[in-house]
């Protein structure tokens, strides 16, 4: 479904943050990229979403070359980003967030309606008239994901979606992400800790110093080794 080959990205030409990254997401599922702060996780996701242009490499989604597309064109191709830090519009209500965000892709598979999204995130149904800045951290994260799903994506990029959330809320968000492949949406999630990734993902990659490991089975010995060593990867650059 998604094929990334030799992707290199940097904020300055001579200092790449992501270095020759290649990976495949063969079918809708939940896939995780794990790494310490500064490893390049956010840079990678923002490149796939069109917010950064790669200096080399290619990105192909469902057979279409989407390398370097601008964000609105990447969205039309089926890529949605739920960014770290949420980045909601503070002056818009929950209802307005979900109504001004429209499906950007049209195919034979119906997208998630506003009603579907409220079923996925019941707390939002009671907060429709509340503005973005009036929501709790957990409600803001739910709205961030719901807004991204409203665009009818083929691939959801979720950057640290459980960051700073209470365990109960984090479990609710994780349950929704796990359910999305059954709705035809693949999920690529960036996480700082291996234990969260192994609980959520079908496959796990480790990103450190801008380079990606081979895919790991979350239930396999390699993933268990990561847990034991708690990602003692200390060669990452300062900027992610």
Image (tube, helix red, strand yellow):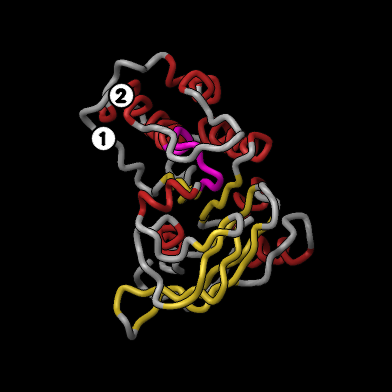
- At a point 55% along the width and 25% down the height, the residue shown is 120
Dot 1 corresponds to which residue?
Answer: 89
- Above or below for 84 versus 235: above
Dot 2 corresponds to which residue?
Answer: 96
**194 relative position to 17: left or right:** right
* SS type, badge 2: helix
**223 relative position to 47: left or right:** right
Question: Nearer the N terminus, badge 2 or badge 1?
Answer: 1
C-alpha gap between disc 2 and disc 1: 10 Å
- Where residue 233 sits: x, y (%)? 54, 73
Q: What's the magenta region? A: 148-156
Numbered badge on residue 186: none
- Above or below for 31 versus 162: below
- At a point 48% along the width and 64% down the height, the residue shown is 36
Identify the image quadrant of residue 225.
bottom right
Q: Residue furthest bottom?
A: 14
């Amino acid at each position: 479904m998604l094929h990334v080959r030799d992707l290199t990205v940097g904020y300055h030409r001579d200092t790449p943050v992501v270095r020759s990254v290649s990976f495949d997401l063969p079918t809708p599922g939940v896939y995780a990229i794990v790494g310490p702060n500064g490893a390049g996780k956010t840079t990678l996701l923002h490149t796939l979403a069109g917010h950064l242009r790669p200096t080399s490499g290619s990105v192909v989604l469902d057979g279409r070359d989407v390398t370097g597309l601008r964000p609105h064109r990447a969205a039309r191709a089926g890529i949605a980003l739920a960014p770290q830090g949420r980045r909601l519009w503070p002056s818009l209500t929950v209802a307005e967030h979900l109504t001004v965000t429209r499906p950007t892709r049209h195919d034979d598979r119906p997208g998630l309606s506003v009603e579907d999204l409220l079923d996925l995130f019941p707390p939002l149904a009671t907060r429709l008239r509340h503005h973005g800045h009036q929501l709790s951290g957990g409600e803001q994260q739910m709205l961030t994901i719901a807004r991204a799903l409203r665009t009818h994506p083929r691939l959801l990029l979720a950057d640290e979606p459980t960051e700073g959330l209470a365990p109960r809320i984090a479990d609710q968000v994780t349950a929704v992400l796990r359910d999305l492949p059954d709705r035809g949406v693949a999920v690529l999630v960036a996480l700082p800790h291996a234990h969260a990734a192994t609980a959520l993902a079908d496959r796990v990659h480790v990103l450190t110093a801008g380079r990606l490991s081979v895919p790991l089975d979350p239930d396999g010995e390699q993933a268990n080794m990561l847990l034991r060593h708690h990602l003692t990867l200390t060669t990452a650059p300062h900027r992610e």
